[in-house]
Amino acid sequence: MRRRTAALAAVMLGAAMLGVPSTALASTAASSSLVPSSSLAPASSLVPSSSLVPSLVSTAAEGQACTPGTVVFSPETPVALGQLGAEDANRLATGKGIVVAIVDSGIDASNPHLAGVVIGGVDLVGDGERADGLSDTTGHGTAIAGQIAAQPVPGSGVVGLAPDARLLSVRTFRSTQQQDVDKGYGPTSQRLADGIHWAADNGADIINVSMSQSSDSAELRAAVEHAAAVGALVVASGGNRASDADAADAARYPAAYEQALGVSAADGNGRATESSIHGPQVDVTAPGGNVLTAAAGGGDCIFAGDAPASSFATGYASAAAALVAEAHPEDPPAGWAYRLTATGLRADADNRDDVNGWGFIQPFAAIELLPDETTRGPVSPYFDTTESAARPPSATVDPDHGASSFLLTREAALFTAIGGASLLGVLGILIVLRRRREAPVDDPSDVEREGGLLHTPDTGADSDRLS
């Protein structure tokens, strides 16, 4: 886009040759509270981990549940695209010129849907995988990538909401399995912060973070603030109970930071459910259940079949933000977020809540919004909208209003009648006077006038008189 073109060119041309050791930015201490908002283990081999409960339904035949190496495509179109009005939105924007960084488990760029879409990346894990971040042993990041920018493939109905956007893979964890956590390859707050910082400095306009943690973090806060300062919007998960079953409804980070757009997962009716963690971090909701998208090492899979997951809701919100960013390149990141929140479908136009935030995103409406002082909803970065709520003032009843309204009306009518009559009299006098002033001047030879009629001199001839 308009920012950091030199940095982005460096990523595209030499991502695999980055001179930053993959362990240089990583923290060695794992954070047990930082977890992806969904897990992608095949349903046929479902095993609970320390913090994640996978939920996956495969489009493949039974026994081939999205198994890496088994390429199975679904001819169906993702249901979420219909819910989001993708056809209308894509007539206005497709994400062209926008770079979305996926700070996650990596991206398997070998999936046919992602051919030519991933323009670079980095590995911050240091587990021996590719230095450019283009590998994904878990599949979490690949699924998000497909939601955002999957390309059409023969035999498949899967396509991304922002198909012309380009992706950066910022690999920040290997998996949440205990053996990986013990080795220092699990998610950490420091590594996530480093990933956001790297994405912001290497050309990302939108930074997708489908992870959350319950504790505030100075380094994470600073990374989100830095991203906003250089023109990138962080779109982050509001939290998911399936991945953090004991979590209370409370703020989750980085979604709760002011500069981030926090996302909760909605069901088929567009409303957040108990599967999402509620709290002040929720700004909007997006589809998060039965998500048909790309799979690592394979073709298509349906994820979150048991319950909506905020990881996938975040993916669609990031794609919507990419559409808005393309349509409004002059806006700051806060403007892109504002358009999505102000146009969200909600019961009360003037208020948010901790369950649905400002409501279900509408990409088309967000793109078309012309904000002004009357725009209802969140605080605007463009105008003072404090008086925009169209609420009529409450009426009060006072039993003592003085004189009867009927008497007042009658007296007013009489006064008007008298005044009208007087006015007509004055007008009549003025008309007479004006006519006199405008009468033609008589010639001196004219005889005298009598009663306004010409008087002809009497010649004495009676025959000249009319009888």
Image (spheres, helix red, strand yellow):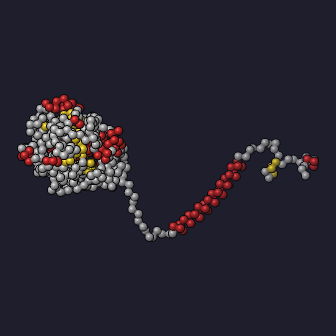
**Residue at point 22% right, 41% down?**
300
Q: Is residue 286 visible?
A: yes
**Horizontal side of residue 110 vs 92, given as left or right:** left
**Horizontal side of residue 431 vs 102, given as left or right:** right
**Horizontal side of residue 451 vs 256, given as left or right:** right
**Residue at point 24% right, 44% down?**
292
The image quadrant of residue 3 is: top left
Residue extending farthest to the front is 62
Q: Is residue 101 visible?
A: no
Q: Position of residue 44 (x, y in %)?
A: 15, 47
Residue extending farthest to the bottom is 399
The image quadrant of residue 302 is: top left
Along the line of sight, the residue nearer the viewer: 179 or 363:
179
**Residue at point 30% right, 52% down?**
269
Classify 64 as above or below 119: below
Along the line of sight, the residue nearer the viewer: 316 or 55:
55
Query: How many numbered discs, if any?
Result: 0
Q: Position of residue 194 (x, y in %)?
A: 14, 41
**Residue at point 27% right, 41% down?**
75
Classify 272 as above or below 67: below
Q: In which quadrant of the rendered image does the N terminus lie? A: top left
**Horizontal side of residue 415 vs 346, given as left or right:** right
Residue extending farthest to the top is 13
The image quadrant of residue 123 is: top left
Q: Position of residue 95 (x, y in %)?
A: 29, 37
Q: Position of residue 372 (x, y in %)?
A: 36, 46
Along the line of sight, the residue nearer the viewer: 413 or 306:
306
